[in-house]
């Protein structure tokens, strides 16, 4: 399982914490306590809480990647031996398990921080898999708790593993091709001065593009289209809001249904795109290009 958190550090911050907890009650064990502290001797503290007592602190002072007024992206990648923490796409720390990770049932975020999105990839129940489920959280400082899901085997189609920090332009095959209820997740960052980027769902045998998803920063538009038989179709531009801005992270989830694609950005439904290629099962490739930095692709 991997947990991705995007947020913003306010100027008045003192500290915040991300806790992988073993219960949703005061005094519950904490398998992993991740705690950046802004106190003039900026550092990140790592610890666990078990049986009513804190364990031995581990600290990292040589590199403090959090900055007041700036965005951040945290990735917690759970392995058999540790929590691996990546910050802004770079490996940061490994915290060896002190409590069996199977005991963890919720995520508690507290302190002086604004959370914009939370995504859980993978997890649960011996054979079922998750393509990436956006879990929208309210913006706060304060406190927020998110139960971590478990999934009975077979409830969801088995997905490919996440691809971390892929290059741009990116082209990859969709394992097993497109199918109903399949979700593709693309996460990344829009740099300052960006003009546009695109995500294309392609048919390798014909080079058709079943869905062209194209945020255009200079036009303040999000264009959707298809290219079938060598020709572009009519553009679709209507959206209730435009979530794409320079110098911000994004989380795009595109879910394939029987009649349409459903597109979510940062946990909120943005638009639908009715299938123009009726044989959508022929879609077998994903292409991402333009002015964008990618942090994750998940099929």
Image (cartoon, rainbow, N blue to C red):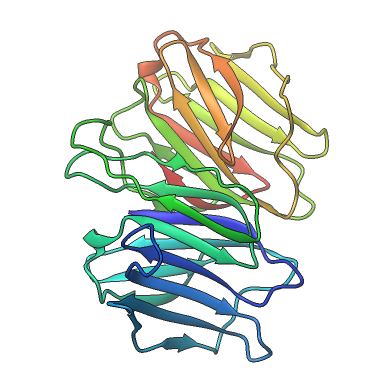
**On screen, 205 above or below 173?**
above
Indicate the position of residue 191 as horizontal and vertical percent values: 71, 54
Which of the 4 quarters of the picture holds residue 82? bottom left
In the image, 4: left or right of 193?
Answer: left
Q: Residue at x 24, y 30 (%)?
A: 155
Indicate the position of residue 246 as horizontal and vertical percent values: 75, 50
In the image, 119: left or right of 23?
Answer: right
In the image, 136: left or right of 75?
Answer: right
Res. 88 in view: no
Q: Residue at x 28, y 30 (%)?
A: 176
Which of the 4 quarters of the picture holds residue 133? top left
In the image, 269: left or right of 71?
Answer: left
Indicate the position of residue 12 as horizontal and vertical percent values: 75, 72
**On screen, 27 above or below 168?**
below
Indicate the position of residue 78 as horizontal and vertical percent values: 32, 62
Res. 185 in view: yes
Q: Residue at x 42, y 77 (%)?
A: 93
Q: How many marks?
A: 0
Location of the N terminus by quadrant is bottom left
Residue furthest front in the image: 26
Location of the C terminus by quadrant is top left
**On screen, 198 above or below 235?**
below
Q: Residue at x 52, y 23 (%)?
A: 262
């Amino acid at each position: 399982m991997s947990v991705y958190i995007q947020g913003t550090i306010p100027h008045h911050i003192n500290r915040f914490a991300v806790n992988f907890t073993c219960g949703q009650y005061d005094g519950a064990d904490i398998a992993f306590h991740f705690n950046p502290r802004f106190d003039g001797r900026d550092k990140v503290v790592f610890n666990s809480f078990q049986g009513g007592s804190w364990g031995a602190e581990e600290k990292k002072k040589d590199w403090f990647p959090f900055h007041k007024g700036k965005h951040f992206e945290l990735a917690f990648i759970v392995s058999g031996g540790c929590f691996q923490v990546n910050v802004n796409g770079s490996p940061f720390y490994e915290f060896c398990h002190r409590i069996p990770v199977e005991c963890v049932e919720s995520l508690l975020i507290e302190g002086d921080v604004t959370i914009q999105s939370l995504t859980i990839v993978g997890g649960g129940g011996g054979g079922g898999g998750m393509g990436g489920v956006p879990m929208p959280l309210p913006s706060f400082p304060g406190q927020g708790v998110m139960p971590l899901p478990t999934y009975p085997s077979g409830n969801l189609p088995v997905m490919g593993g996440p691809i971390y920090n892929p290059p741009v332009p990116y082209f990859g095959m969709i394992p097993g091709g497109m199918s109903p209820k399949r979700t593709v997740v693309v996460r990344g960052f829009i740099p300052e001065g960006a003009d546009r980027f695109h995500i294309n769902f392609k048919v390798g045998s014909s080079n058709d593009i079943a869905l062209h998803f194209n945020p255009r920063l200079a036009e303040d538009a999000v264009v959707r289209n298809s290219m079938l038989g060598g020709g572009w179709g009519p553009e679709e531009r209507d959206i209730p809001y435009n979530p794409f801005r320079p110098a911000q992270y994004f989380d795009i989830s595109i879910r394939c249904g029987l009649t349409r694609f459903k597109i979510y950005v940062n946990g909120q439904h943005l638009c639908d795109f009715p299938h123009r290629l009726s044989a959508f099962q022929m879609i077998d490739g994903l292409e991402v290009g333009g002015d964008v930095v990618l942090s994750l692709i998940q099929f």
